[in-house]
């Protein structure tokens, strides 16, 4: 019985150490995709949220995630610095989907990051 308990503890110890491997460390980046334009309503952000696709590119990694009907997106990526872009069928320039970029430039995702705003702006 004691030998079985030791074997179970050794197995669990092995699982615990492999799950904390540096190869599996990820952080969560969350935010909103939207476009600028029009008059901002009091108490609302100065952009209009929209669905689409958001891409995070950096450190040899590219992740593409969906922004829901409210523009919300969430991506799990390895820690690092990412260029965050987006696009949506709700935002076109001369019939072509415009590219949207994160406000403030590259996103430092060395830890979980929330509140990233990816905006499309017409010219």
Image: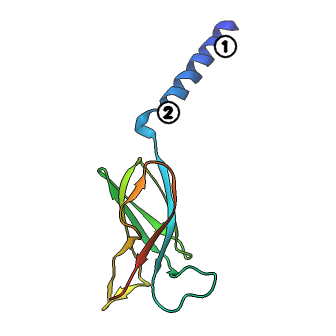
Q: Which residue is mark 1?
A: 5
Mark 1: secondary structure: helix
Which of the pair 18/72 is nearer the observer? 72
Give the farthest residue toward the right.
Answer: 1
Please tell me which residue is depicted at 36% across the width and 87% down the height of the picture.
Answer: 122
In the rendered view, does 53 fall on the left or right side of 10? left
Mark 2: secondary structure: loop
Q: Is residue 114 above or below residue 42?
A: above
Q: Give the image quarter of residue 40.
A: bottom right
Q: Is residue 64 above or below residue 6?
A: below
Q: Which residue is mark 2?
A: 20
Q: Is residue 107 above or below residue 40?
A: above
- Which quadrant is home to the N terminus? top right
Coordinates of residue 6 in the picture (x, y in percent): 63, 12
CA–CA distance in space, label 1 to label 2 = 23 Å
Coordinates of residue 86 in the picture (x, y in percent): 39, 71
Q: Is residue 96 above or below residue 28?
A: below
In the rendered view, does 121 fall on the left or right side of 45? left
Indicate which disc residue 71 carries: none
- Which quadrant is home to the C terminus? bottom left
Q: Give the image quarter of residue 22.
A: top left
Q: Residues within 10 Å of mark 1 (few under 14, many from 20)?
A: few
Which of the pair 95/121 is nearer the observer? 121
Give the farthest residue toward the top.
Answer: 2
Q: Nearer the viewer, mark 1 or mark 2?
A: 2
The answer to which of marks 1 and 2 sits earlier in the sequence is 1
Coordinates of residue 111 in the picture (x, y in percent): 48, 48
Please tell me which residue is depicted at 52% across the width and 74% down the height of the picture.
Answer: 71
Please tell me which residue is depicted at 51% across the width and 51% down the height of the picture.
Answer: 112
Residues at discs 1 and 2 in contact (Cβ within 8 Å) = no
């Amino acid at each position: 019985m004691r030998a079985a308990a030791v074997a179970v503890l050794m197995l669990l110890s092995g699982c615990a150490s492999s799950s904390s491997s540096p190869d599996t460390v990820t952080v969560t980046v969350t935010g909103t995709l939207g476009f600028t334009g029009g008059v901002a309503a009091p108490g609302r952000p100065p952009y209009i949220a929209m669905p689409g696709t958001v891409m995070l590119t950096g450190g040899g990694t590219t992740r593409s995630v969906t922004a829901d009907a409210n523009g919300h997106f969430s991506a799990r990526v390895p820690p690092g610095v990412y260029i965050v872009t987006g696009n949506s069928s709700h935002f076109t320039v001369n019939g072509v989907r415009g590219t949207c970029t994160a406000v403030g430039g590259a996103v430092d995702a060395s830890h979980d990051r929330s509140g990233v705003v990816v905006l499309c702006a017409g010219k």
